[in-house]
Image (spheres, rainbow, N blue to C red):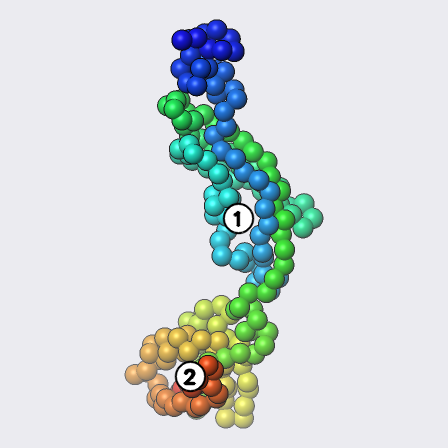
């Protein structure tokens, strides 16, 4: 059987290897949108590379994929380079595609909680060692864990977005410092009572 385009020996779909690869595509990729938080700068759900890999359409086997991006206004111009095999051939081919990714702004849950002053736990720093304790907390707590620090005459109230942050920090400090734990009912949501954790440390 011969290639219907050039007359050489056909290897796939009545085409020779060169003619077949000249018209076949390794993958398809179209422009799309992504959402980026204007508070922390993180993308919603996945990274740019991760979203591009999700958007790729192909029935072929891709063995590698690299992405280069350039910011232009409110969009990213991405050059996507993939290598792989175009079925039914087993020759490795490399293909480039350039797409536009429109960036739309939103505010993630974490930034909404921070801007709104939301908090689930309070570490009440008290006593003569309050400044030493604050220094330790500053070092051990993740970035954006603290909603606000309220300075008081007797010490500080450190408000944390998630009770897990407070629990982890307190478990490390327990034994080195005196810790008293309490709870306070602050509301109800969908029939479930909501409590706020308080940890007094001195």
Q: Could you say where residue 9 lies in the image, as x and y percent from the top left?
A: 42, 8
- Residue annotated with mark 1: 48
> Eyeballing the image, is 80 above or below 54?
above
> Eyeballing the image, is 15 above or below 77?
above
* Residue 106 lies in quadrant: bottom right
Of all residues, the one furthest to the bottom in this rendering is 153
What is the number of the mark on residue 187?
none
- Residue annotated with mark 2: 192
Badge 1 element = helix
Q: Could you say where residue 50 lies in the image, as x and y percent from the top left?
A: 47, 48
Q: Which image quadrant: the C terminus? A: bottom left
Could one spot residue 24 in this view of the protein? yes
- Crowding at dot 2, Cα within 10 Å, few <14 / some 14-19 / many 20+, comes out as few
Residue shown at the point (56%, 79%) measured from the top left: 117
Q: How many marks?
A: 2
Of all residues, the one furthest to the left in this rendering is 175
- Nearest to N terminus: mark 2 or mark 1: 1
Q: How far apart are marks 2 and 1 (CA)?
A: 38 Å
> Eyeballing the image, is 16 above or below 114?
above
- Crowding at dot 1, Cα within 10 Å, few <14 / some 14-19 / many 20+, comes out as some
Residue shown at the point (45%, 25%) measured from the top left: 93
The residue lying toward the viewer, choosing from 177 and 111, is 111
Does the CB distance between marks 2 and 1 fall below 8 Å? no
Badge 2 element = strand
* Residue 181 lies in quadrant: bottom left
Residue shown at the point (63%, 59%) measured from the top left: 105
Of all residues, the one furthest to the top in this rendering is 7
Could one spot residue 169 in this view of the protein? no
Q: Could you say where residue 82 lies in the image, as x and y percent from the top left?
A: 47, 33
Residue shown at the point (46%, 10%) measured from the top left: 3
The residue lying toward the viewer, choosing from 134 and 76, is 76
User: Comparing marks 2 and 1, which lies closer to the viewer?
Assistant: 2
């Amino acid at each position: 059987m011969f290639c219907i385009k050039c007359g050489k020996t056909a290897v796939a779909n009545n085409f020779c290897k060169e003619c077949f690869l000249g018209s076949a595509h390794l993958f398809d990729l179209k422009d799309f949108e992504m959402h980026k938080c204007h508070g922390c700068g993180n993308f919603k759900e996945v990274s740019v590379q991760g979203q591009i890999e999700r958007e790729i359409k192909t029935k072929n086997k891709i063995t590698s994929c690299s992405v280069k991006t350039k910011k232009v206004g409110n969009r990213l111009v991405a050059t996507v380079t993939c290598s792989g095999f175009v079925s039914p051939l087993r020759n490795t081919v490399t293909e480039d595609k350039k797409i536009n990714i429109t960036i739309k702004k939103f505010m993630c849950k974490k930034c909404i909680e921070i801007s709104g002053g939301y908090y689930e736990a309070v570490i009440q720093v008290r006593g003569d060692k309050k400044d030493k304790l604050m220094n330790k907390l500053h070092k051990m707590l993740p970035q954006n864990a603290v909603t606000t620090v309220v300075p008081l005459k007797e010490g500080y109230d450190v408000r944390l977005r998630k009770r897990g942050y407070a629990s982890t920090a307190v478990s490390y400090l327990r034994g080195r410092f005196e810790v008293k734990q309490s709870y306070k009912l602050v509301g109800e949501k969908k029939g479930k009572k909501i409590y706020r954790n308080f940890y007094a440390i001195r």
